[in-house]
Amino acid sequence: MEKPIEELMCILDRLRGEGGCPWDRKQSFESLKPFIIEEAYEVAEAIDKRDWHELKEELGDLMFLILFFTHIAQEKGIFDLEEIAKGTAQKIMRRHPHVFGDLRVKDSQEVESNWNKIKEKEKGSLLSGIPRGLPALLRAQKITRRAQSVGFDWEEAKGALEKIEEELRELKEALEKGEDLEHEIGDLLLSTVNFCRLVGIEAEEALHKACDRFVERFSYIEKKLKQQGKDLREVSLNEMDRLWNEAKGK
């Protein structure tokens, strides 16, 4: 009996081969990119819901897509599954010298600092290797955390909060003068992410939860208006505000 990974690769042989699936045969690195991003988000959502059955299923979907990419690479003679596994094993061991070498560390913070030093040596820059394709809040948090590892940071959260206030003033001034707001809004968001990091909050997760609250409260407005036989587009802002505050109180 074939091992599960080998079986999946054999399935891909059939799907991509002569007489296989027309859809699978025409896929490429580029066409599959949106799917692997989507699957990664579905894995994260299953974890948020603490649905372990769904997590297993979503990890399977993600694994299949990783193997799909690998299969295409093999077809093109770029790399194969064995090269991926060997390269990853070597990288993980290289970045854990406190486990696979003689380095001594005192805590996880020192482990992270040392990891960043090794990455910087490999990549040539402390901030290299942070994909621009990440969600912007997550990218900002990673960038500022890397900068923190070499001491480029506020000494305490109060300084970051004062920076938010400064950026907000600059945004107000830009608005009053009719200047371009994108730059100032970007600075304000980055300063907010910095503050989040310093007080131990993941900015991405905080915004997700805020969005969840907004959806929950707006859905409450919709539900109440529907019960009254009213349409959202026909009621006043005051009435929606009243229901919004009612939802907040629940």
Image: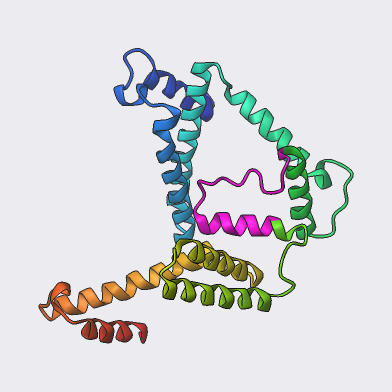
* Quarter occupied by the C terminus: bottom left
Q: Which image quarter: residue 148?
A: bottom right
User: In this view of the protein, can residue 226 be seen by the observer?
Assistant: yes
**As drawn, which residue projects farthest toward the top?**
18
Name the residue: 38% across, 15% down: 17
User: In this view of the protein, can residue 201 be seen by the observer?
Assistant: no
Q: How many marks?
A: 0
**As drawn, which residue projects farthest toward the front?**
177
- Asked if 182 appears above or below 80 in the picture, the reply is below
Image location of residue 223, percent across then percent down? 21, 75
Residue 139 part of the magenta-drawn span: yes
Q: Which residues are magenta?
A: 123-146
- Asked if 20 appears above or below 214 in the picture, the reply is above
Name the residue: 64% across, 30% down: 85
Colouring rule applied to residues:
rainbow
Residue 12 part of the magenta-drawn span: no
- Asked if 85 appears above or below 95 in the picture, the reply is above
Q: Relative to the observer, which residue lies in front, 211 or 165?
A: 165
Give the left or right position of residue 64, taking residue 225 as reference.
right
Q: Relative to the observer, which residue lies in front, 27 or 126?
A: 126
- Asked if 162 appears above or below 63 in the picture, the reply is below
Name the residue: 66% across, 70% down: 198
Give the left or right position of residue 49, taking residue 153 as reference.
left
Q: Which image quarter: residue 236?
A: bottom left
Name the residue: 43% across, 31% down: 30
Image location of residue 12, percent across then percent down? 43, 23
Image location of residue 215, percent across then percent down? 33, 69
Image location of residue 48, percent across then percent down? 47, 60
**As drawn, which residue projects farthest toward the left?**
229
Q: Relative to the observer, which residue lies in front, 168 or 111?
A: 168
